[in-house]
Image: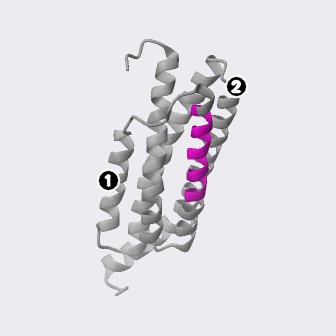
Amino acid sequence: MKLDSLQKLYIDELRDLYNAENQLLKALPKMAKGASSEELKNAFEKHLGQTETHVERLEQVFAELNQTPKGKTCRAMKGLIEEGSEILKEDGEKSVLDAGIIVAAQKVEHYEIAGYGSVRTFAKLLGQDKAAELLQTTLDEESETNELLNQLAETGVNPEALMETELATTGSGR
């Protein structure tokens, strides 16, 4: 596709997000399974349900545009998921691994926040008000998930990881 109009760029970016969300549908259960913190597992399971809704919203936007959502692979999401998968394969202290999983998840959320913010702006400029509202709702949910991950990291996982690390280093733990 020749990107010679904002409309074409908008559709191209929507396809990128659609593929990204579908990749996440496969990755989130693995992340939940790999997390040792119950709160983190629950956050991933909740976000899986939201991600299913994000895909449905994107399908609504494509239906309004009379376009197909398929046809693009989101290489960025593929890379982010591969990075997260590396952490899931590591051996180490459970809370330290959970901290790494949160880092990987937040990288994904920040990517999605950037993407949804951009396409929402394009939708507004193109007079696609219904699409802009749907995209804003998803953007809000992605931001809420990012904030939840921040809270889990700051109040539980990261302090626990520090404590486990200190115990392992001083030898007084295990």
Q: Quadrant of the N terminus?
A: top left
Residue found at x 37% / y 73%: 165
Viewer-nearest of discs 1 and 2: 2
Q: Amino acid at mark 1?
A: Glu
- Whether 91 is drawn above or below 119: the answer is below
Q: Position of residue 19 (x, y in %)?
A: 44, 42
Magenta residues (range)? 47-62
Q: Position of residue 15 (x, y in %)?
A: 46, 34
Q: Secondary structure at mark 2?
A: helix
Q: Quadrant of the C terminus?
A: bottom left
Instruction: Tell me the tag on residue 113.
Output: none
Q: Amino acid at mark 2?
A: Asp
**Colour scheme employed for the rendering of this structure:** one colour
Residue found at x 53% / y 28%: 67
Q: Tell me: 13 left or right of 168.
A: right
Q: Secondary structure at mark 1?
A: helix
Q: Viewer-proximal residue, 97 or 120? A: 120
Circle 1 Cα neighbour tier, 10 Å, few/some/many (<14 / 14–19 / ≥20)? some
Q: Which residue is mark 1?
A: 82
Q: Position of residue 26 (x, y in %)?
A: 43, 57
Q: Are marks 1 and 2 in contact (CB under 8 Å)?
A: no
Q: Viewer-proximal residue, 124 or 142? A: 124
Q: For residue 163, what is the image quadrant?
A: bottom left
Q: For residue 166, what is the image quadrant?
A: bottom left
Residue found at x 40% / y 74%: 94
Q: Position of residue 108 (x, y in %)?
A: 45, 47
Q: Give the residue furthest to the top.
A: 4
**Helix, strand or loop: magenta stretch:** helix
Looking at marks 1 and 2 on the same chain, the residue that comes earlier in the sequence is marked by 1
Residue 102 belongs to the span the image colors magenta: no
Instruction: Tell me the tag on residue 129.
Output: 2
